[in-house]
Image: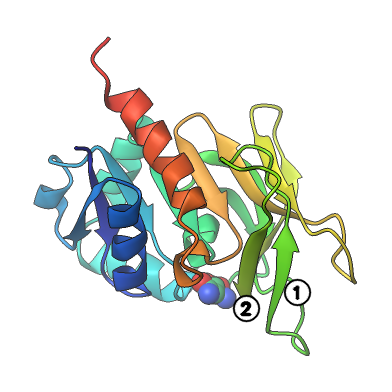
Amino acid sequence: MVTVGVLAVQGDVREHANALLASGAQPVPVRRPSELAALDGLVIPGGESTVIDKLMRAFELREPVRAAIDAGLPVYGSCAGMILLADEVLDGTSDQQTLGGMAITVRRNAFGRQVDSFETDLTMPALTEPERPVRAVFIRAPWVERVGDEVEVLATVPAGPAAGRIVAVHQDNLLATSFHPEVTGDARVHEYFVRLVRESSRPA
Ligand code: GLN
């Protein structure tokens, strides 16, 4: 069984752990640099990206996690986690840093102040049962404004004021969603990530 860490400095750690278990992976909370070595993959949960950024620096996790990403560790970032994986952030705080790794530009809190949170059904052809929509829960979510050539777009908002906005992306071992699949009981996004983890941890 693959072991997938959930960065446990802030955010909805338990929900991701449950979704990983449902996807056939062994979840473990990660708070210390020494815990990274045992991992086949890592989830960076939603929460507040500026706080997660500060706590990762305080816990001396930032550089080891960056190095692990560079070395090819599969990482899934949801919402604040997407912001942390982005090479560039718009509307961040002045001292906000990301880990980077994905050739995307994200806009923080992009959906606007009137509609902080909303839900919609998305089509995600890359998942199992692609005809079954994914219920996407957005909570003060970012969207993706620019993707590099190496990035695969997995989902866009189908309708409404944000129609066409990119909200799920994949690049090599990295996956990011603007929304929170861990709160819906549908584990297909986590299953997609666990497949990336299995493929990358298989001996060559
Ligand atoms: N708005 C938050 C941020 O900037 C993200 C919200 C979330 O992860 N639910 O980090």
> Outermost residue toward the bottom?
114
- Please state the horizontal and vertical placement of residue 82, each as a whole percent of the image: 53, 56
Relative to 200, say whether 119 is above or below: below
Residue at position x 20%, y 59% in the image: 30
Is residue 98 visible to us here? no
Kindly tell me whether mark 2's CB lies below 8 Å from ligand 1. yes
State the CA–CA distance, disc 2 to disc 1: 7 Å
Is residue 203 visible to us here? yes
Within the image, what quadrant is residue 143 found in? bottom right
Q: Which quadrant: the N terminus?
A: top left
Residue at position x 37%, y 40% in the image: 194
Residue at position x 84%, y 66% in the image: 162
Disc sitting over residue 204 in the figure: none
Mark 2 nearby-residue class (10 Å; few <14, some 14–19, many ≥20): many
**Residue with the mark numbered 2:** 140
**Residue with the mark numbered 1:** 111
Relative to 178, say whether 49 is above or below: below
Within the image, what quadrant is residue 104 found in? top right
Query: Which amino acid does the dot numbered 2 rest on?
Result: Arg
In the structure shown, which secondary structural element does the residue marked by tag 2 occupy? loop
Mark 2 and mark 1 residues within 8 Å of each other at the beta carbon: yes
Relative to 84, say whether 199 is above or below: above
- Please state the horizontal and vertical placement of residue 190, each as a whole percent of the image: 43, 50
- Please state the horizontal and vertical placement of residue 33, each as a whole percent of the image: 15, 52
Q: Nearer the viewer, residue 57 or 41?
A: 41
